[in-house]
């Protein structure tokens, strides 16, 4: 919903439109223009949200789950036409009970069984498969002089691993991948009215598929996450219903791989932009965790998250009413000069956990997955943090970006098999930043 209504004293970013072609082409150029007069909180009439752009303000929102509800986390940014709404509701597509959209205590009720099933033991046991799959995908590149990193690795690796973990039959992987693209368009895009009906029909089929998958696993359990959740359901059916298991799988099928696709693309691009960075990683693979952490700050694969206020509250000096929708601009928080020393620099050796400049304490990148939660449990998206697999060997250290990828460009990490035409009015919360599509082997 777009609106011009705002609270007295709140700056207004009249030109801020995160769904515009200009913004999607280079969100950091928009950040440099200091929308909303550079205020940590400003109102954006284009989307009807209060944009929260500072590290400390977003951190405060994440920490106060009683005041800032997750109910709108996956709500469509643009209005949905009535016909599409009816199709979605008939197909069971509602904001809840997905964990990402639930508040306590309901979130904890679903999180606890999910944490049992999505155990560190199960995830750690997958590391050999992850390493072998990465090696196989990279070997398939062969002697190609130029190749598409996203199509070759960044998209199929996390998607196939997560689908396998869930218990999705391999012959259905391509179809589920397509559905994930439609889901991004629905929640984070501005699709035309005529496209919304097609998207809604697909989303209803997506929901039905996940519910049918649960029924299949009830009849024939396997060694997978869906079957583990069903076993927990049988212990106490009233605590975890089969419909809720289907909802957990629906969330995981998207959140479990989309962000990783963006992270791989963003990290490789940022490393290759400066040959010295790539050379350092090749010589010192122990820098890889630091490179991942710095990428999450500098060019996050989750650029935006959302909340809604449950009561009147003052945030960064702005008095917000109950029901105010918040657009948490995580990408802006990662470039916040009040939180990071020289935030515009990509620094593989950025210190962590200590002061790096007068008055500054180095902070971790802000992510939905780093919201306060029980130790060892998944976040609102049901994700945990397993040990990192060992670096994959493959089309080796001599890589460079084609010239066209040395400047910001729109995301196209679904470009390998896009389910719908990627439009300039579609924003994907999982990856606003610029993934490299093509890589060139130097010396060829």
Image: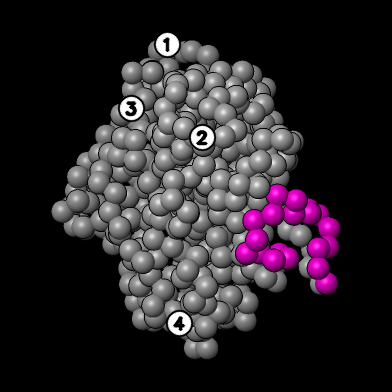
Mark 1 vs mark 2, foreground winner is 2
User: In the picture provided, is 249 more to the left or to the right than 359?
Assistant: left
* Displayed quadrant of residue 361: bottom right
Query: Nearest the camera: 290 or 38?
Result: 290
Mark 1 vs mark 3, foreground winner is 3
In the image, residue 29 lies at what x, y percent? 47, 69
Q: Are marks 2 and 3 in contact (CB under 8 Å)?
A: no
Q: Residue furthest front?
A: 443
Which callout, 1 or 2, points at the residue further toward the start of the chain?
1
**Numbered tag placed on residue 220 in the rendering:** 1
Residue shown at 67% from the left, 26% from the top: 390
Q: Residues within 10 Å of mark 1 (few under 14, many from 20)?
A: few
Q: Is 355 one of the magenta-colored residues?
A: yes
Which callout, 4 or 2, points at the residue further toward the start of the chain?
4
Residue at the spot of label 3: 174
Q: Are marks 1 and 2 in contact (CB under 8 Å)?
A: no
Residue shown at 56% from the left, 46% from the top: 272
Q: Work out which quarter of the rendered image holds the N terminus and state it.
A: bottom left
Q: Looking at the magenta stretch, what is its main secondary structure?
A: loop
Residue shown at 37% from the left, 40% from the top: 414
- What's the distance in space between the residues labelled 3 and 4, CA to CA? 43 Å
Residue at the spot of label 4: 12
Secondary structure of residue under mark 2: loop
- What's the distance in space between the residues labelled 1 and 2, CA to CA? 53 Å
In the image, residue 225 lies at what x, y percent? 52, 23
- What's the distance in space between the residues labelled 2 and 3, CA to CA? 35 Å
Query: Nearest the camera: 158 or 402?
Result: 402
Residue shown at 55% from the left, 50% from the top: 273
- What's the distance in space between the residues labelled 1 and 4, CA to CA? 56 Å
Residue at the spot of label 2: 443
Q: Is 88 one of the magenta-colored residues?
A: no
């Amino acid at each position: 919903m777009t609106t011009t209504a705002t609270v007295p004293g709140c700056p207004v970013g009249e030109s801020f439109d995160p769904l515009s072609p200009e913004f999607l082409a280079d969100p950091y150029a928009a950040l440099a223009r200091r929308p909303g007069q550079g205020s940590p909180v400003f109102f954006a009439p284009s989307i009807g949200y209060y944009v929260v752009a500072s590290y400390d303000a977003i951190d405060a929102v994440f920490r106060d789950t009683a005041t800032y509800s997750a109910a709108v986390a996956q709500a469509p940014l643009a209005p949905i036409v009535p016909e599409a709404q009816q199709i979605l509701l008939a197909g069971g597509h509602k904001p809840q009970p997905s964990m990402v959209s639930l508040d306590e205590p309901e979130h904890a009720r679903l999180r606890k069984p999910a944490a049992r099933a999505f155990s560190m033991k199960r995830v750690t046991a997958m590391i050999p498969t992850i390493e072998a799959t990465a090696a196989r995908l990279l070997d398939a590149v062969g002697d190609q002089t130029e190749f598409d990193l996203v199509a070759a690795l960044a998209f199929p690796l996390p998607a196939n691993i997560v689908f396998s973990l869930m218990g999705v039959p391999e012959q259905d992987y391509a179809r589920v991948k397509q559905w994930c693209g439609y889901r991004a368009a629905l929640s984070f895009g501005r699709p035309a009215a005529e496209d919304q009906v097609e998207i809604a029909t697909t989303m209803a089929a997506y929901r039905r598929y996940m519910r049918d998958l649960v029924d299949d696993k009830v009849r024939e359990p396997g060694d997978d996450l869906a079957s583990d959740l069903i076993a927990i359901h049988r212990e106490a059916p009233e605590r975890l219903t089969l419909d809720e298991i289907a909802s957990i799988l629906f969330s995981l099928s998207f959140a479990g791989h989309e962000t990783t696709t963006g992270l791989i693309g963003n990290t490789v691009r940022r490393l290759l932009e400066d040959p010295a960075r790539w050379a350092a990683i090749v010589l010192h693979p122990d820098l890889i965790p630091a490179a991942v952490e710095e990428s999450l700050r500098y060019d996050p694969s989750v650029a935006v998250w959302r909340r809604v206020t449950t009561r009147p509250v003052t945030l960064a000096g702005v008095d917000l009413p109950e029901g105010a929708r918040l657009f948490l601009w995580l990408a802006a928080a990662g470039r916040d000069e009040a939180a990071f020393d020289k935030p515009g620099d990509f620094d593989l050796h950025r210190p962590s956990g200590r002061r790096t400049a007068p008055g500054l304490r180095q902070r971790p990148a802000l992510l939905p997955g780093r919201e306060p939660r029980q130790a060892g449990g998944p976040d609102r998206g049901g994700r945990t943090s397993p040990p990192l697999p060992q670096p994959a060997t493959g089309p080796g250290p001599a890589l460079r970006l084609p010239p066209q990828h040395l400047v910001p460009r729109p995301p196209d990490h679904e470009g390998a098999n896009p389910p719908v035409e990627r439009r300039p009015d579609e924003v994907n919360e999982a990856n606003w930043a610029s993934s490299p599509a093509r890589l060139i082997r130097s010396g060829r």
